[in-house]
Image (cartoon, rainbow, N blue to C red):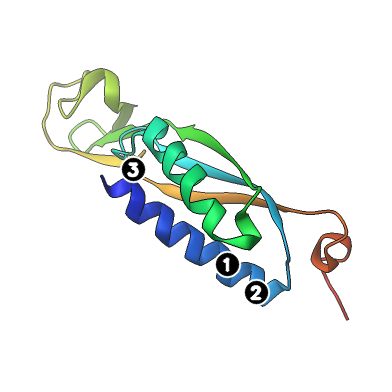
Amino acid sequence: MHEMGIILHLAKTLEETAEQEKISKITRVTLEIGEVSGILTDYFVECWNYFRRKHPVLETAELELQTIPAVTWCDACKRTYPTVQYGRTCPYCQSGETWLLKGNECIIKEIEVEDGDPQAADPYPK
């Protein structure tokens, strides 16, 4: 159920960014979500579709999700491997001296704005 909390934080961050940059309408938000982040993407999209309508700058914004593959590092043999396939035990040396290198993130990758927005036309206004 942490999807709602993430969406609320995301909406607040996007609203603050829009206000700072004088953006009136965000049309698309691309997020990178780690493969082992624990985010249920179907529920996440449902939450987005509900909450975006409560924020005028996001009201029509589409959400695109991109997956960041989970990768684990083994301290014993100094190699990486796919986390989901092998878990916490290194497939090369069978060590448990491993840690997640990437794949737990939730990152705003890109924000697209409505054509005609001052920032869309000139990213470096005078």
Please tell me whether mark 3 or mark 2 is closer to you in this view.
Answer: 2
Q: Is residue 104 above or below residue 59?
A: above
Q: Is residue 33 left or right of residue 75?
A: right
Name the residue tied to disc 2.
Answer: 19
Identity of the residue drawn at 63% across and 50% down: 110
Q: Earlier in the sequence, mark 3 or mark 2?
A: 2
* Residue at image mark 1: 15
Identify which residue, 57 or 31, lies in the foreground.
Answer: 57
The reply, left or right, for residue 102 in relation to residue 96 is right
Give the residue type that dot 2 points to. Answer: Glu
Q: Is residue 69 above or below residue 118?
A: above
Res. 102 mark: none
Image quadrant in which the C terminus is located: bottom right
The type of residue carrying mark 3 is Asn
Residue ID at (61%, 69%): 17
**What residue would you read off at disc 3?**
104
Give the Cα separation between the discs numbered 3 and 2: 29 Å
Q: Amino acid at mark 1?
A: Glu
Left or right placement of residue 67 versus residue 83 in this view: right
Q: Does 75 sit above or below residue 113? A: above
**The quarter of the displayed image where residue 9 is located:** bottom left
Which residue is depicted at the point 52% across and 34% down? 66
